[in-house]
């Protein structure tokens, strides 16, 4: 028989526990309850009493209202993690919960704001084995054509991705192995990407974003992800990132014959890609022989550049614009106060700030930081897709 408070939502306890990286045993120790009690709470056989709920709220850093918030349906399509094979299960569970929360939060914002229309080419393939290198090159080129990017370097990749209708978030993941992850939400017909800020590296973060874009474009209809097909699928996303960021037609012309490692470093600032990514791309295009590739990579290792290259610390990573500007608009227009937004979401302030890529403490009661918002309130009028570096949310209209 179920006892305890009424309205308790067992799934919310599971979500917050996994988001905090806790097992049932560890949570039980923190709240001084047995693992079996935690299990009964999560499977709905029992509900915590008022005192236990307060302890859970304090321990898990979330408002009490979180535990009575109805669950939203979650799309069963797989979340693509770059390092699934080597990543601890609790880290995967944490990231998966944040992906679900991002989609919930985005859904709320879209009740008031019109986000950029979806403008993403995709392939109708449900078996990754049907995707070959030639198809990846073709789809990467199609992306550039659809977004009017030409064949040169992409100035602001994250803005380009957001303008195409992909909802992006970036925040610290607490692990160097969690670079980023993505998921198509078919219920909402929107793709989502979360990027890690832990490495704080402009070049690596751009490759991570291009990699996740590869999943969005290539793997929309892949419905199963396991260790048997993971490596092939990840290799395909890597291949897409290289093709998209370094088009064969232009990159081939700029690379000199018999390039040295210094030649690749000299191209970093122009293309916004790491020397190692360009070296690999040159090998795949047969611009350097396998022997030259080995020689250059030995030089990379000898100089200690595997984890950090020259110029890495000279450029700040790109940042997402859509979600922070959306919050700024809602606050400026008086649709929400900071407290009202947090109350509606029912989440901890730190979680909301992370998910919406806001500065830490932004949602405290203080003056709103000026983000130079270009968004306006939702209306039926929509402007055409832009690739301008400052117009990701200029696609919003005014609500009638």
Image: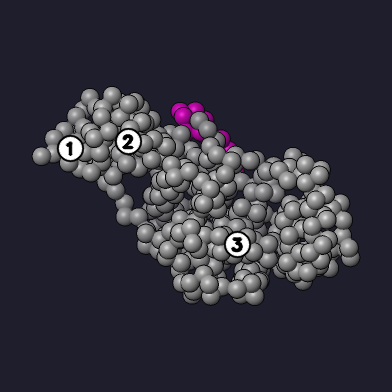
Disc 3 and disc 1: Cα gap in Å? 45 Å
Residue at 65% across, 54% down = 207
Residue at 73% across, 60% down = 280
The first of marks 2 and 3 along the sequence is 2
- Secondary structure mostly seen in magenta is loop
Q: Where's the N terminus, which quadrant? A: top left
**Between residues 177 and 214, which one lies in front from this camera angle?**
177
The first of marks 3 and 1 along the sequence is 1
**Between residues 308 and 291, which one lies in front from this camera angle?**
291
Pointer 3 residue? 235
Q: Is residue 237 above or below residue 59?
A: below
- Asked if residue 331 shows in the view, the reply is no
| Residue at the farthest right position | 257
- 300 relative position to 376: left or right: right
Residue at 54% across, 63% down = 233
The first of marks 1 and 2 along the sequence is 2
Pointer 1 residue? 46
Where's residue 169, x and y in %?
52, 48
Numbered disc 3: secondary structure: helix
Q: Is residue 242 above or below residue 60?
A: below
Q: Which residues are magenta?
A: 362-372
Pointer 2 residue? 24
Where's residue 235, x and y in %?
60, 62
Q: Is residue 249 above or below residue 6?
A: below
- Residue 131 on the magenta segment: no
* Mark 1 Cα shell of 10 Å, populated few (<14), some (14-19), many (≥20): some
Q: Is residue 193 above or below residue 148?
A: above
Disc 1 and disc 2: Cα gap in Å? 15 Å
Residue at 63% across, 69% down = 140
Q: Quadrant of residue 237?
A: bottom right
């Amino acid at each position: 028989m179920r006892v305890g408070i009424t309205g308790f939502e067992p799934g919310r306890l599971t979500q917050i526990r996994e988001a905090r990286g806790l097992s049932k045993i560890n949570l039980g120790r923190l709240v001084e309850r047995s693992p079996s009690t935690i299990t009964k709470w999560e499977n709905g056989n029992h509900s915590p009493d008022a005192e236990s709920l307060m302890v859970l709220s304090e321990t898990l850093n979330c408002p009490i209202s979180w535990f009575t918030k109805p669950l939203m349906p979650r799309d069963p399509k797989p979340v693509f993690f770059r390092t699934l094979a080597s990543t601890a299960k609790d880290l995967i569970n944490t990231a998966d919960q944040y992906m679900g929360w991002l989609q919930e939060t985005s859904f709320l914002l879209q009740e008031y704001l019109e986000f950029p229309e979806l403008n993403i080419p995709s392939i109708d393939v449900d078996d990754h084995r049907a995707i070959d290198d030639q198809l990846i090159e073709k789809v990467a080129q199609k992306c550039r054509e659809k977004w009017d990017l030409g064949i040169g370097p992409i100035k602001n990749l994250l803005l380009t991705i957001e303008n195409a209708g992909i909802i992006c978030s970036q925040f610290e993941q607490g692990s160097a192995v969690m670079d980023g992850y993505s998921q198509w939400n078919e219920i909402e017909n929107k793709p989502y990407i979360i990027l890690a800020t832990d490495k704080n590296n402009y070049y690596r973060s751009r490759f991570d974003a291009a990699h996740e874009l590869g999943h969005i474009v290539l793997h929309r209809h892949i419905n199963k992800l396991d260790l048997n097909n993971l490596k092939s699928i990840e290799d395909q996303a890597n291949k897409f990132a290289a093709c998209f960021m370094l088009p064969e037609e232009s990159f081939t012309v700029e690379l000199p014959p018999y390039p040295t490692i210094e030649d690749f470093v000299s191209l970093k600032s122009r293309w916004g890609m790491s020397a190692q990514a360009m070296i690999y791309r040159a090998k795949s295009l047969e611009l350097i022989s396998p022997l030259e590739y080995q020689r250059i990579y030995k030089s990379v290792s000898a100089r200690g550049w595997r984890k950090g290259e020259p110029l890495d610390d000279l450029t700040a990573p790109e940042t997402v614009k859509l979600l922070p500007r959306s919050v700024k608009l809602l606050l400026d227009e008086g649709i929400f106060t900071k407290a009202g937004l947090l109350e509606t979401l029912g989440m901890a302030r730190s979680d909301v700030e992370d998910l919406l890529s806001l500065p830490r403490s932004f949602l405290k009661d203080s003056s709103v930081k000026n983000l130079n918002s270009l968004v306006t309130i939702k209306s039926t009028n929509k402007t055409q897709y832009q690739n301008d570096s400052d117009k990701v949310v200029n696609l919003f209209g005014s609500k009638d």
